[in-house]
Image (cartoon, coloured by chain):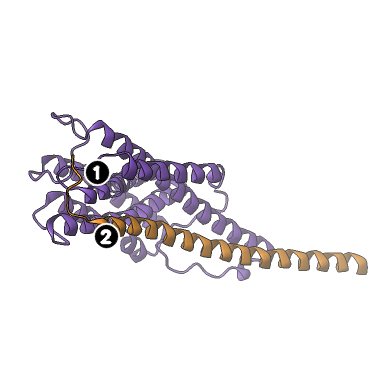
Amino acid sequence: MTNALPDNTGYVAAAYLVFFAVVLIYVVIMATKLARFERELTELDELADRQAEERERETVHS
Amino acid sequence: MLYGSRLRALSILTAVTLTTGFGLAFFYAPMDADQGFMQKIFYVHVPLAIVALCGFVFGGIMAIQHLRTGDSRYDLRSYVAIHLSLILGAGVLITGSIWAKASWGHWWVWDEPTLVSFLIVFLLYATYQPLRFSIEDPEKQARYASVFAIIAGAFVPLNFLAVRLAQSYTHPRVFATADGGLPAKMQLPFYICLIGMALLFATLWKYEMASKHTSAKLRSLRRKLGGDEAVAPRGRTASPSLGTGS
């Protein structure tokens, strides 16, 4: 074991950066999906509210 | 089944294990006498490769379960495992190329069995998604994809065998070598990195499974609230279709 070796810090940093980039890209994709789910859930929540209001109106009229 | 349960604990455990592993690799493991500092790539590249290959085998095992039971959940598990292993596999090829450039002065060496055998496995699995996409009928798609995953999964151990039989021992031997393999001070960081990488795979797999299930549940909810016309037709996709009850 010796320290008198050529310095390849750049290559080592590049390899670890690739790994972290892969993980980060995955996290970004998951975040995009999460945002889509939130949007869809809000839409469905509004739809459920509208349906509940309609049902309420129908029972008042009858 | 809720795939999102215990996801937070698993994510924290993954981050802690990987940080510890990389920390030990840089500050505890000794400098390699032959390769010097660039050997540190080994601690990210090899665990990534082992986990990617195990992920392909896991995909094959889930495919066997799918063919045995006919349960579409196993098809989804197999699909997600293979999808994830392909992403990790791309990482393996890139980090391997960087190591090759630093070590041999070339980005790719065709007479190195380790590299070429991994590339073959990667390219084989790269056809998995197009195969699925080419089959419109969801049931047929799931069945054919399972057969593919089993055959390709059986091919993966050949990769390990090729590494074992390789004449040029560029990669350090770790398991069951006559001369003892890695020194103890390198083994500890390596095993921790390997466990961390396996945990990362499990975490991302669970994230993806939870995402697919949530998507299916939202679709089912939309159908219940707005009727069939409220749900856009699924169209042709490589992704497995899920029953709403799953």
Residue A61 horizontal side relative to residue B49, left or right: right
User: What residue sits right under mark 2 in the picture?
Assistant: A10
The crowd level at tag 2 (other Cα within 10 Å; few <14, some 14-19, many 20+) is: few
Letter of the chain that mark 1 sits on in the rendering? B
Residue flagged by tag 2: what amino acid is it?
Answer: Gly
Quarter of the rendering containing residue A52: bottom right
Q: Evaluate whether residue B135 shows in this view.
A: yes
Give the color of chain A as drawn. orange
Q: Evaluate whether residue B67 shows in this view.
A: no
Residue B30 horizontal side relative to residue B9, left or right: left
From this view, report whether residue B16 is shown above or below residue A26: above
Estimate the x, y position of residue B90 in percent, counting from the top left: 29, 58
From this view, report whether residue A14 is shown above or below residue B78: below
Give the color of chain B as drawn. purple
The crowd level at tag 1 (other Cα within 10 Å; few <14, some 14-19, many 20+) is: some
Q: Which mark is residue B154?
A: 1
Q: Using the numbered discs, state the Cα–Cα distance from disc 2 to disc 1 in whole angstroms.
A: 37 Å
Letter of the chain that mark 2 sits on in the rendering? A
Residue flagged by tag 1: what amino acid is it?
Answer: Ala
Which residue is more in the foreground, B33 or B84? Answer: B33
Quarter of the rendering containing residue B86: bottom left
Quarter of the rendering containing residue B119: bottom left
Residue B202 horizontal side relative to residue A42, left or right: left
Query: Marks 2 and 1: which is nearer the front?
Result: 2
Q: Quadrant of the N terminus of chain B?
A: top right
Estimate the x, y position of residue B182 in percent, counting from the top left: 21, 35
* Residue name at image x 44 percent, y 57 percent: B240
Estimate the x, y position of residue B167 in percent, counting from the top left: 7, 43
